[in-house]
């Protein structure tokens, strides 16, 4: 299987885990058990760093798409992909800021959570639109 499809497949479970741990972190923030909140925070940071690393590699493998976006404009290119890319940058910077500063019960933390929910929806749409291509890679892999 080509490296480009391997990273695409890896992104799916890592994305799910990053979103799940983020939602659990938010829920734990409403409770009184700091240890539970802390465990979800650590889990979310680890999953999000893994997601960040995989996304960077994913962008690298699809760099020609971004180059053509700059040269030719959006045209018929996917607006969802552009929105996903933009949200990824916003969430990465806000998440990093929350790790560096005290983000517990902060306005930025709540904003990051809401943007994360929006990103989860758009990331899901992004994957669903490409699932037939990804599925074909499994068939191709089985044929060798």
Image (spheres, grey):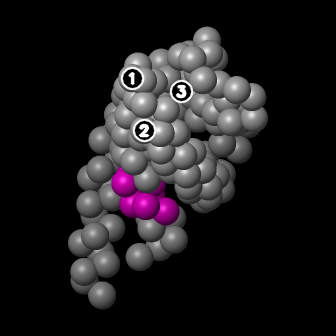
Residue 71 at x, y percent in the picture: 73, 36
Residue 93 at x, y percent in the picture: 70, 32
The residues colored magenta run: 7-13
Residue at x 70%, y 44% (from the top left corner): 67
- Which residue, given by chain and number where applicable, does mark 1 sit on? 31
The answer to which of 117 and 23 lies nearer the viewer is 23
Residue 35 at x, y percent in the picture: 47, 39
- Which residue, given by chain and number where applicable, does mark 3 sit on? 83
Residue 122 at x, y percent in the picture: 41, 29
Q: Which mark is residue 44?
A: none
The answer to which of 111 and 129 lies nearer the viewer is 111
Q: Nearer the viewer, mark 3 or mark 1?
A: 1
Q: CA distance from mark 1 to mark 2?
A: 9 Å
Mark 1–mark 2 CB contact (< 8 Å): yes
Q: Is residue 45 above or below residue 86?
A: below
Q: Which mark is residue 36?
A: 2
Residue 72 inside the magenta-drawn segment: no
Residue 51 shows in the view: no
Quick check: 128 left or right of 31? left
Q: Is residue 115 above or below residue 12?
A: above
Label 3 Cα neighbours within 10 Å, binned few <14 / some 14-19 / many ≥20: some
The prevailing secondary structure element of the residues shown in magenta is helix
Secondary structure found at label 1: loop
């Amino acid at each position: 299987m080509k490296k480009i499809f391997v990273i695409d497949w890896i992104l799916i479970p890592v994305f799910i885990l990053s979103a799940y741990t983020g939602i659990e972190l938010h829920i734990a923030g409403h409770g009184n058990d700091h240890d539970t909140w802390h465990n979800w925070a650590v889990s979310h940071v680890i999953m999000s760093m893994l997601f960040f690393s995989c996304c960077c590699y994913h962008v690298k493998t699809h760099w020609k798409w971004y180059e053509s976006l700059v040269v030719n404009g959006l045209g018929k290119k996917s607006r969802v992909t552009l929105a996903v890319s933009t949200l990824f940058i916003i969430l990465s910077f806000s998440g990093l800021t929350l790790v560096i500063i005290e983000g517990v019960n902060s306005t930025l933390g709540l904003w990051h959570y809401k943007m994360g929910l929006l990103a989860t929806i758009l990331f899901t749409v992004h994957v669903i639109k490409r699932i037939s291509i990804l599925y074909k890679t499994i068939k191709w892999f089985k044929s060798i």
